[in-house]
Amino acid sequence: MNANPQFLATTAQVDQAAIQALPNSRKIYVTGSRPDIRIPMREISQADTPAMFGAEKNPPIYVYDTSGAYTDPQTTIDIRSGLSPIRNAWIQERNDTEELSGPSSNYGVERLNDSKLQALRFNLQRKPRRAIVGKNVTQMHYARQGIITPEMEYVAIRENMQRAEYLQALKQSGPQGEKLAAMMGRQHRGQSFGAAIPEIITAEFVRDEIARGRAIIPANINHPEIEPMIIGRNFLVKINANIGNSAVTSSIGEEVEKMTWAIRWGGDTVMDLSTGKHIHETREWIIRNSPVPIGTVPIYQALEKVNGKAEDLTWEIFRDTLIEQAEQGVDYFTIHAGVRLQYVPLTANRMTGIVSRGGSIMAKWCLAHHQENFLYTHFEDICEIMKAYDVSFSLGDGLRPGSIYDANDEAQLGELKTLGELTQIAWKHDVQVMIEGPGHVPMHMIKENMDLQLEQCHEAPFYTLGPLTTDIAPGYDHITSGIGAAQIGWYGTAMLCYVTPKEHLGLPNKADVKEGIITYKIAAHAADLAKGHPGAQIRDNALSKARFEFRWEDQFNIGLDPDRAREFHDETLPKDSAKVAHFCSMCGPHFCSMKITQEVRDYAANHGISEIDALKKGMEVKAIEFVKTGAEIYKKS
Amino acid sequence: MNANPQFLATTAQVDQAAIQALPNSRKIYVTGSRPDIRIPMREISQADTPAMFGAEKNPPIYVYDTSGAYTDPQTTIDIRSGLSPIRNAWIQERNDTEELSGPSSNYGVERLNDSKLQALRFNLQRKPRRAIVGKNVTQMHYARQGIITPEMEYVAIRENMQRAEYLQALKQSGPQGEKLAAMMGRQHRGQSFGAAIPEIITAEFVRDEIARGRAIIPANINHPEIEPMIIGRNFLVKINANIGNSAVTSSIGEEVEKMTWAIRWGGDTVMDLSTGKHIHETREWIIRNSPVPIGTVPIYQALEKVNGKAEDLTWEIFRDTLIEQAEQGVDYFTIHAGVRLQYVPLTANRMTGIVSRGGSIMAKWCLAHHQENFLYTHFEDICEIMKAYDVSFSLGDGLRPGSIYDANDEAQLGELKTLGELTQIAWKHDVQVMIEGPGHVPMHMIKENMDLQLEQCHEAPFYTLGPLTTDIAPGYDHITSGIGAAQIGWYGTAMLCYVTPKEHLGLPNKADVKEGIITYKIAAHAADLAKGHPGAQIRDNALSKARFEFRWEDQFNIGLDPDRAREFHDETLPKDSAKVAHFCSMCGPHFCSMKITQEVRDYAANHGISEIDALKKGMEVKAIEFVKTGAEIYKKS
């Protein structure tokens, strides 16, 4: 059905790149209360501990898996068919939606009827769905009625994978199980700044968090292909990857490939920020092939529809765009309704003005018409659309600072307050909301952002870009921002929007996407550790144990990027034998601190506790009063 | 004099790579109170603001310059001759040192007399110096006697370069000077956690900080080639780059090249951690060509001298090594005197035992002999050597955690306490001290490290490796650790030891060294901003202004890595015309938020303040109470 040979060539490429499982990894599924609730996890198998360190069996570990069916060899991938619509039954069983005869937006109809687009079009047989008139189909609406949806159960199981159940199983796994479980489960008590993450996430806990607006499950009824995930500060910190072409460069095939690439490395959601030609068609291909929620900024497309003239935008064009995208299955919309006319002049003395594209479009519209932002005045109309498809709000920070100079200024903080007011309006409609945040902020002003957001937006999940902690490193803004992202994640941000090395300079390619994703997986995980997220440390513990025991392959495979770790190792010590050698290139064969440590352990084992104690006491020149005892530092789990 | 053709080929390479100035940059010197105090700075010139943004003249900015004479086209570089010994006169004028007839260490004599080494040896004509018997030649000793040395004056001027004087000059630089100075000098009030950085650093302030042990100037009298620098929490945060071959790989030429490469990108000090053959000769080449202080871990070489058998180490061998290296000009020694016998058994139950090479050597020695660490028992003897050459202590954290699991445990914190006791002993001898710190620490436990260090080590400068905030990303540990380094720098760490992407996997090559350096420059600068270091934000402000005004070349050149920024930009928009285009590849020509912002500014300018105020008031649906006013957030400077 797709006649464009160049485009097909690109899609074939996607298949090959995406369907390889990661090394020593296997996709498994945990089944929930019904057979069609099947939660994917990645199982990473490990080698046994070498004899010199005790010859233990090391059980597999399980990690959260965003990569979808692409890494499942049981599934045949053909991006022309899209993914299996695993949520279809759940949606239909609720009996509150109807299948439409076709797109109900003017633009959707127009594109469908344009035969010139045939070659580019994804061939979707399924018709769009919409809430029956008078019904509200949001997860928040169900949650507030006390209903636990399959989506809620799904995310509860998904969030638990690194937790108590795993350690319980480990304990029962043979003679060394008890010891291993204790070692793997040992974890520092975190500092959570008010986050309250239970040891076991139940579906009821998920429901309650959604009902009170503290978490969202972005899950458009027209995106039945997603594997549900949750965004909230009492859950694992998530990351988003932006993709999208612009008028200058990039094709549909490349964008689909960036999506599959982004989720392979851990993207929890993907935003399609395309601004060029064929936005509608590109989006369809991405959504139909995406197992993660897709976000967009509808104003970008609306602007294309008025040929780039912000002043020509109207509510009607915007409304039609929302419906068009909602019926394709976009899971969350960035809406810059907080860019109120009164805030616009506050940006005139900024160093870098308005850097948000959506923000600047709305600012221009406001000034041109000398009227209040139509996204603000039509906010309740927007809510009506959102709740008919369960599209979540991502309330845009159109006035976020674009430089350290502009951080936390009155324009930014004024908008934040408005976003808080809009949150309450959305919640009145049971529409799910998250709040976008900055931007460029020096480290010591990051916490203020988080605290104000929690207070003024009533604990709606925060979703921040970075923040970048300095402006002086173009080419390295994944790092300037990764520093800020880790901190704001620790303080309570629920999802971190990645920044790639190309930020401020150009469009990211696949290598940049991966670099951005891995940097943000690091930031998110560092935040989980600091918050004391139950079970988060298991992966660190497993990797460190592999490292100590010179299980090189396991060290690579448990890490976030096995390919790079292996490549770096092999640069210095390329021989296969080196990967089982009990030394590394940093110290060389005669000079190994790990080996010496093992001698310390052997000494301790051979001499017994009493002798060790005697040694300690005998050598004491004066009494040692340790600042902290182990019991105080560590949390038993 | 150097007959090894392969080696010469490599040194020629170094020359070519190192002597290029960075783009649009010029080396200038500021002269102090005497003509031989000449402090280098890098002047980065800027283009004028384009007409649409106001056609302002943008004066050059000045940045701290670690790259030495290599980036000075006025200097002829020949690494066979080494750098000019700029401190010679200062040292000789003090009349407290004597020139020796040759090396006074046994090993130094032995190597000098070994004719097989002729081809490898740096041809140093100068004889080593040592304090006259009974004299103490440390900067701390002078400081405590109220003497301001040329080194102290030098660092005072060097630290001031981004500050009030620059803004003062700017103010007087023409009609727009006042406005520009106000804009460039505007800076957020920081959060300093007890650091107290004056607006202007005076030589007297430097003297006082050194006298009380809160800062050090590592400056061996046998390393007269250095451009002095200061390490302390009331100064700019510094970074260290480790280089060094091992038995497995790397040559002398490569190591010299890594040093020149590291300082080109901003390394403030360099540690030579070589463990392989020709340690002595490699070190000589590095020191003679290094304008930055060089640190070493003498126990590595001592171990080589006993063929890798830790138990065969003796105080005599170690002592001879200290003298050998002190007479070559090493500026600071890592000494693992805190690895006391009583702490060794505390590591037996760790996940990753002892990961410090020096720590594990001393642990092994202690266990083998069942005796207290000879570095601890001979600590005063070591002080006697240090003060005869002004070598600074870097008290090693031999028991630092090698995994998140082991962070802040009793072995680590016990050692820290001992380091505090040793600090006081060193200070009794007026020997300069800094304290090494971890390691692997989750974010929420980083501040505890800093607070305990300040308290227990009496504010001696902290010098930390990272810390790495998670273990799960081998191949990206520059990032896992950059996150921690930025935070601990903010909390008060004076120098950050870089970590490269090869950490745990292999030896860094030049690309890795650069990646590590830039990451740590980011961390250090983010820390300076967060501490509110006076003038730190000027570079951010200048870069952001260039960015806003589409001065692409200036944006590249003001950044930490102009080469990469330009390369990334050109990947998407390779045409030269694009570098003056008023749009970027992210949005395309019809869709530019910067352009729209300018329209907002024009609107504001055309309508005047009163109308803007009316606009704001008129549109107010209800009273707006901003959370913070500008006056509260910003510090006027």
Image (tube, coloured by chain):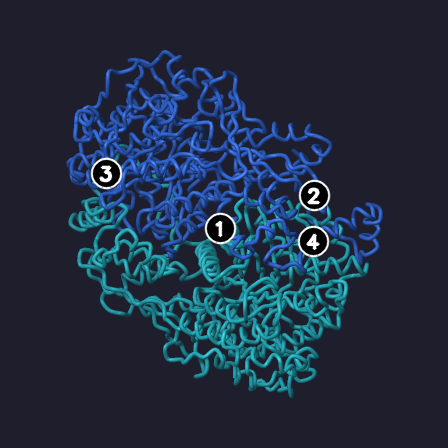
Chain colours: A blue, B cyan
Badge 1: few (under 14), some or many (20 or more) residues near its Cα, within 10 Å? Answer: many
Give x and y (percent) for residue B308.
70, 64
Q: CA distance from mark 3 to mark 1?
A: 36 Å
Q: Nearer the viewer, residue B431 or A165?
A: A165
Amino acid at circle 4: Lys
Q: CA distance from mark 3 to mark 2?
A: 56 Å
> Which disc is residue A522 wearing?
none
Residue annotated with mark 4: A595
Q: Counting residues from the N terminus, which is met first, the one under dot 3 or under dot 2?
A: 3
Q: Are marks 4 and 3 in contact (CB under 8 Å)?
A: no
Badge 2: few (under 14), some or many (20 or more) residues near its Cα, within 10 Å? Answer: few
Q: Chain of mark 4?
A: A
Q: Quadrant of residue A227?
A: top left
Residue annotated with mark 1: B479
Q: Quadrant of residue B250?
A: bottom right
Amino acid at circle 3: Met
Residue annotated with mark 2: A630
Give x and y (percent) for residue A104.
22, 20
Q: Nearer the viewer, residue A124 or B425?
A: A124
Residue annotated with mark 3: A362
Q: Are marks 4 and 2 in contact (CB under 8 Å)?
A: no
Examine the rendered structure and indicate whether residue A322 appears above or below residue B274. Answer: above
Amino acid at circle 1: Ile
Q: CA distance from mark 4 to mark 2?
A: 25 Å
